[in-house]
Image (cartoon, coloured by chain):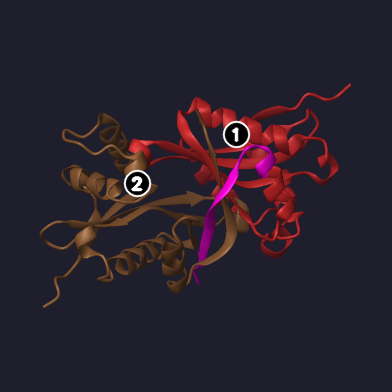
Chain colours: A brown, B red
Amino acid sequence: MEKEINFRLATRNDLEQIVAMLADDVLGSKRERYGLPLPTSYIKAFKAISADPNNELVVADDGNEVIGVLQITFTPYLTHQGGWRATIEGVRTSASSRGKGVGTKLINYAIQRAEERGCHLVQLTTDKQRPDAIRFYEKLGFQATHEGMKLKLK
Amino acid sequence: MEKEINFRLATRNDLEQIVAMLADDVLGSKRERYGLPLPTSYIKAFKAISADPNNELVVADDGNEVIGVLQITFTPYLTHQGGWRATIEGVRTSASSRGKGVGTKLINYAIQRAEERGCHLVQLTTDKQRPDAIRFYEKLGFQATHEGMKLKLK
């Protein structure tokens, strides 16, 4: 029988597993720093996210462990007649759960949250070095209508 | 003598001029609804943006009128070792001020705000139907490394 996946807000106790997932990734391995105890920068960011009513750090929990994570940011904009948008970022699933549809369920959960919050649009950017991710989002209905432009600061 | 441009947070009194700018645009004209009195959805969105410490609606003011606008959203993320990002959206300059470098100054102001807020990255998405905008941002140092993917909700 397939285990039921529960989608819920992340708690402080999930943070080690979340950071391990973020670091276990081709691009993530270059920029994350996983080790116990966790670097304090992650704990500080977790607190800032949790304190912000317009940010939700969501995990997929299979009853034993956290097998997926993403962050949703809800933003009010003037454009589109004052419409709210949901921005998805930091999507990862655990190595052991890949290919089992967890990512799809996770994104569908985020879309549901966006609807519940009255958003007219869900958006995300994907690194052009991740062609599989681009196809994954296109299958879910996303369209690559925009260039995702980034400027690194010192 | 060139007029000095002042960059500041938008106030409720600027809102009519801002919405007029958003509507006076090839893509904006299809999705905005400018008329006086302003549709209440804009006023509601303005209040939500103003109440959120992680959102700043910035205008360029030449002393006589508002000639540019953009919104900056500051977001704490777990990725990049718990780094903050600044997301720019809704960038417009008034028809009368175009070609005078107002857009460049406005984006540079937003970059400065991102630095002041300790962000490691400034990001935005530009519609692929705006090739001039893409070149404009590339000149300012942005790189189109990502696909900007959007999903419209009903």
Q: Is any atom of residue A44 visible in this view?
A: yes
Amino acid type, callout 2 = Gly
- At x 83%, y 40%, the residue is B99
Closer to the camera in the image, B102 or A31: A31
B143 left or right of A113 in image:
right
Residue A61 sits above or below residue B94 on the image: below
Image position of B81 with respect to A102: above or below: above
**What range is drawn magenta here?**
B137-154
Q: Does the magenta segment cover residue B74?
A: no
- The amino acid type found where label 1 is placed reads Ala
- Residue B40 visible in the current orientation: no
The image quarter in which residue A34 lies: top left
In the image, taking residue A107 as reference, residue A11 lies left or right, namely left
User: Residue A89: image x %, image y %?
Assistant: 40, 52
Question: Given the current orientation, which residue lies at the most extreme bottom position?
Answer: A1
Q: Position of residue A108 (x, y in %)?
A: 35, 68
Q: Is residue A124 above or below residue B5?
A: below
Horizontal side, residue B121 vs residue B100: left or right: left
Front residue of A130 and A80: A130
**The N terminus of chain A sits in image quarter:** bottom left
Q: Secondary structure at mark 1?
A: helix
Q: Residue at x 58, y 28 (%)?
A: B112
Q: Residues within 10 Å of mark 2 (few under 14, many from 20)?
A: some
Instruction: Determine whether the residue tagged by mark 2 lies in a helix, strand or loop.
Output: helix
Q: Which residue is mark 1?
A: B110
